[in-house]
Every structure is written in structure tokens, then in C-alpha cells.
Image (tube, grey):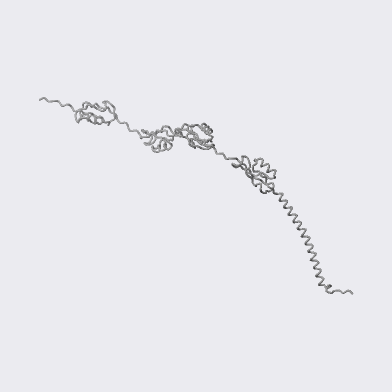
Amino acid sequence: MLTVNKAMHSPKRGWLVAACAALLACGLLVGLVGCSCGSDQNQGGKQETEKKAEDTKTPPNVVGMTKDDAARVIADAGFKVGTVTEEESDKVAIGMVVSQKPGSGTEAKSGSTIDYVVSKGVKKTPAQVAVPNLVGMTQTQAEDALAKAKLVSKAEDPVYADGVEPGKIFKQSVAPDTKVEEGTAVSFVAALGKEVVAVPNVANMAKDAAIKTLTSASFNVDIVEMYSSSVAAGNVIGQNPNPKIQCVKGTTVTLSISKGAAPAPKEQVAMPDFMTLSVEQAEAVCSNAGLKCAFTGADSGTVVAQSIVAGTKVDRGTTVTLTIEELPTLATEG
């Protein structure tokens, strides 16, 4: 007779067994899913690494190549030529690549640019040359002289210069015989000759104002005085050269300055003959003629000479000098 264990058939015991079975099934399912996901992740990482390897590569080494060869090699390697510059180098021949960026020992994105530097060779020191003396030359002569000396000429605007022939150079920027590098610029200035300006109009100006106006315009002034009934005393009657005439600076302008109206003419009288007259007689004649007498010689006696010839027309009030000589003393009889 079969005996049944009641404990095994209890409801509580059955629930526990079912729960364990369910947990076991879930564990198996999770394991299968995990394996599948891990496999997918490993596969994706491998593909990403392979793609990254395809996007980057090592730039070619173009150092030592010519400029054109370097450009061709860079293009063939799947890169682009970037900025190409030049620099002096005493180690790399002219026209050859000195350096590059990025370098050949690095990684760079495919299709990116590569910059490189090309040698200009060794810097040459310019030769030293002597600056020629340009003073006295024309512009053409100066330019020829500078060109022969391997210098650069620079003509400045001509200016007025006293004492210098028009068109001739009288100034240069670098002194003659100075040693400079070939290619140095030397400027020079040619003369326009003496500067001419218009003479100012000073008519009717006061004397001092007229002089100031003319000297301010670089003219010299000479003064001549004369009578004028129409121009006030002290003012300019006229000038020479005339106003607005173009004259060289330093020219002398002569001004005629008014002394005012001329005085009324004096009455003219004939010079008397004073010869042999005594002092008293001579004084009387002078007074009557409206003249003045001055005596020289003896204190008394007769006139033996006069300073103005008798009969000469002179202004009333003129002074005549008379020479007096004593009369000889007559011997008396004893």
C-alpha cells in the first residue's frame, strides 16, 4: 500500500517549489540576453576603431623636397597643401622645404591641410657704396649718378633759393661720400631760382606803415621826400616799382614821401656891389636890399671881397660875407 507524505502535498510547500523554478528560468534568460548584448557591443567597438583608423593617417615627410614636389606628395597622400611660407636658411638650399606642420611622425585627419616652409637661402649683406655729390646737378644728372651708384633717387618738390641757378640741385638728404647700402633712397631738392612776389600798394599810407608793409613782403625801402599840395605831409605820394609788379624778393622800392605843400617862393633881389665900401656903408646897403651881412678880416676899413658876385639873383634874407681890409695909414708931413 502506497504511503503518501502529507508534508510534500501541503499548499505552502508547492508554492516554494514553483517560485524556485521561476527564478531559475529568469536567470537562464538574462544570461542569454547578456551574452547577446556583449557580443553586439564588442562588434560595434571593433567597427568604430576600424573607422577611426580609416579617418586618420600619418602625413608624408616632405622636408628636403622642392616646393612643387612637396605639394604633389601631399596631394597623393590624401592631404591638402596649407600655408606655404618662406624663410632664410643657411642649412637648407634655396627652394627646398625646411619644415612642415603637422610633422610626418604624427597623426592627422585625412584631407586636412599641411603647412610647410620653403628656404630662401642665405641672406646676402648689401654692398656698401658712396653717395655721390648731387649739388649743382640737374634732376636728370642726379638720377643718373644715383642709378650708377645702385641707389634709389627721390626728387623732392623744387623750392625758391637765392643764389642758386634754377633747376640745379642745392640740397640732398645724405651727405656726399657717405657709405650706405645699395638700394638706399637718396632725396634731393632743386632750386626754382629767386622768389618773385607782387609789390604791395602803399600809396597814401603813412611813411612808417608803408615801410612796414614793404619789409614784411621782403622788400627793401628807400625814401625820397618832396613837396605835394595834394598828399598830406608824411604820407606816400608814389612808389617805384609800381604796385602789383612782380619783383624778386629783396628788391628796393623807392617811396616818395610828401613834405606837404611847398612854401611860397621868396622875393628875389640882385646882389649889390660892396667893393670899396666901408663897414657902415656895407651894412646900410645890405639892409636896404633885404640882405644880411657877415664880416671877416679887419674890424674897420673897406670891402675888398664879397662871397656872392654882384648882380646875382638871390632870395631876400640871404647872407653875404664881406671881407674888410684896413686902409693904409698916410704919412704926415713934419
The answer to whether 30 is drawn above or below residue 73 in the figure is below
The residue most toward the top is 333
Residue 242, x across and y down, in percent: 43, 32
Please tell me whether residue 33 is drawn above or below residue 89 in the rendered image: below
Residue 314 screen position, x and y as percent? 29, 28
Q: Please, is residue 114 above or below residue 233 in the view? A: below
Q: Is residue 277 left or right of residue 27?
A: left
Q: Position of residue 14 (x, y in %)?
A: 82, 71
Can you say which quadrant of the picture contains the N terminus?
Answer: bottom right
Left-right relation of 323 to 121: left
- Say which of 48 and 95 sits in front: 95
Residue at the extreme left of the image, as rendered: 334
Left or right: 123, with 29 as reference point:
left
Farthest-out residue, front: 91
Q: Nearer the viewer, residue 212 or 70?
A: 70
Where, by quadrant of the figure, is residue 271 drawn?
top left
Quarter of the image with the C terminus in it: top left
Please give the count of numbered marks on the rendered protein.
0
Q: Looking at the picture, tell me which residue is in the foreground, 303 or 69.
A: 69
Q: Position of residue 254 (x, y in %)?
A: 40, 33
- In which quarter of the view is residue 87 placed? top right
